Image: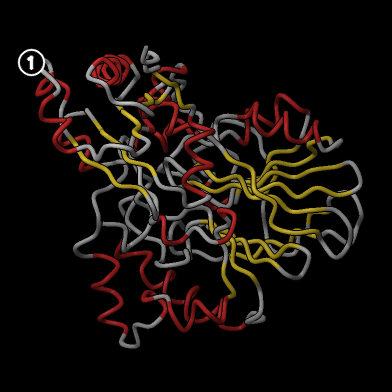
Amino acid sequence: MKAATRLNIMTAQELARIVLAKEELFILDVRNESDFHDWKIEGESIDTINIPYYDLLDGMDKALDEIPDGKKVLVVCAKEGSSKFVAEQLVEAGRSNVYYLEGGMKSWSEHLEPVKIDDLKGGGSLHQFVRIGKGCLSYMVISSGEAAVIDTLRMTDVYERFAREQGAKIKHTLDTHLHADHISGGRKLAEQTGAAYWLPPKDAEEVTFAYEKLEEGRDITVGNTTIRIQPIHTPGHTIGSTSFIVDDRYLMTGDILFIESIGRPDLAGKAEDWVGDLRETLYGRYKKLAQDLIVLPAHFGKVSELGEGGRVMAKLSDLYRNNPGLNIEEEDVFRRTVTENLPPQPHAYQEIRQTNMGKMTPDEDEQREMEIGPNRCAVHDR
């Protein structure tokens, strides 16, 4: 007697680890075509097709014709319900190794995967938190029982749990700039842990809350005093954008410089005003820094930017050789590149900015809806 085929559930964490390990997976995305083309799950060894749920209500023949037999199949929708129904129908049709994504694309958008960057030479460690479904990156510096979190995302429980597991107390949360693509968790995490919340004052003129001023010359220490977070004013994405040099080895660039692109200057409506600052930061200020610094950005736009183990990082000198945004010699060409024909702006970015200023207080469901979709902070993210 043939054993019954079983329907399987895949969590966002399990999916993230498949993507980072570059394992093979076939995805059937049953969302509307427009939602699929705007934002989908990608990976080096992942094949994806889109057949909207309503096209499958009369039968699975179309899906069965397009899904290769014998492959692990994951069915995906926005929240879970439609994908579970379709996955059940595939199992009933005799397909094995079928999964549906628990929580749908909403859970995929919110999952954070911690990845260790390295031990720090002054003692302690540096960790990158990869929000793989949205392309956001944040960081935790740990030393002598203390921690600092940089560009905190709104899922603050992940950082609290990780710090606790590492035996560290969060003493500082820092935002490199006033974010427009996602809701910052920096202030919330600071309130929950008693930490200091730091923000560049030039980005904070309209905020409604107290904060510590991130300014050049005001270094921040974590645990062992040799672990130093050194702020550098690097405007262009915003007027207050600030980069950090950590442990004299790592350059945290926020949304100014990415691995395969550069930051866009238009999300506050001031592209023409800020394009000169952006060029000066990229072609002036960063050029004067040690070129063996390891760049750690706040976002990535393509899965090709995910390196070994999921780390998103590159040597500054390599970026000056390979990043197209750092190789535009003529200023007028640069100006056109970063002000014209840009990717669509992030979903609800004006409301996100207002929330990060403290002027809006959306509830959890509203925050989740505001953040749906890719980050689109880079010039070349199309």
Residue 159: % across, % down: 68, 34
Residue located at (87% from left, 35% from top): 167
Q: Quadrant of the N terminus?
A: top left
Way the structure is coloured = secondary structure
User: Which sits in the foreground, 208 or 123?
Assistant: 123
Residue located at (29% from left, 25% from top): 95
Q: Is residue 235 above or below residue 373?
A: below
User: Which sits in the foreground, 336 or 90?
Assistant: 90
Tell me if 4 is positioned left or right of 255 in this view: left
Question: Toward which corner of the image does residue 339 lie, by quadrant?
Answer: bottom left
Outermost residue, bottom side = 329
Residue 73: % across, % down: 34, 33
Badge 1, how many Cα within 10 Å: few under 14, some, many 20+?
few
Residue, disc 1: 58
Tell me if 138 is positioned left or right of 338 in this view: right
- Tally of marks: 1
Q: Is residue 355 above or below residue 363?
A: below
Outermost residue, front side = 1
Q: Is residue 196 above or below residue 128?
A: above
- Say which amino acid is labelled 1: Asp
Q: Quadrant of the C terminus?
A: bottom left
Residue 271: % across, % down: 31, 61
Residue located at (49% from left, 76% from top): 319
> SS at mark 1?
loop
Q: Is residue 89 above or below residue 153?
A: above
User: Which sits in the foreground, 79 or 194?
Assistant: 79
Residue located at (56% from left, 37% from top): 112
Tell me if 41 is positioned left or right of 118 in this view: left
Tell me if 151 is positioned left or right of 335 in this view: right
Residue 265: % across, % down: 36, 60
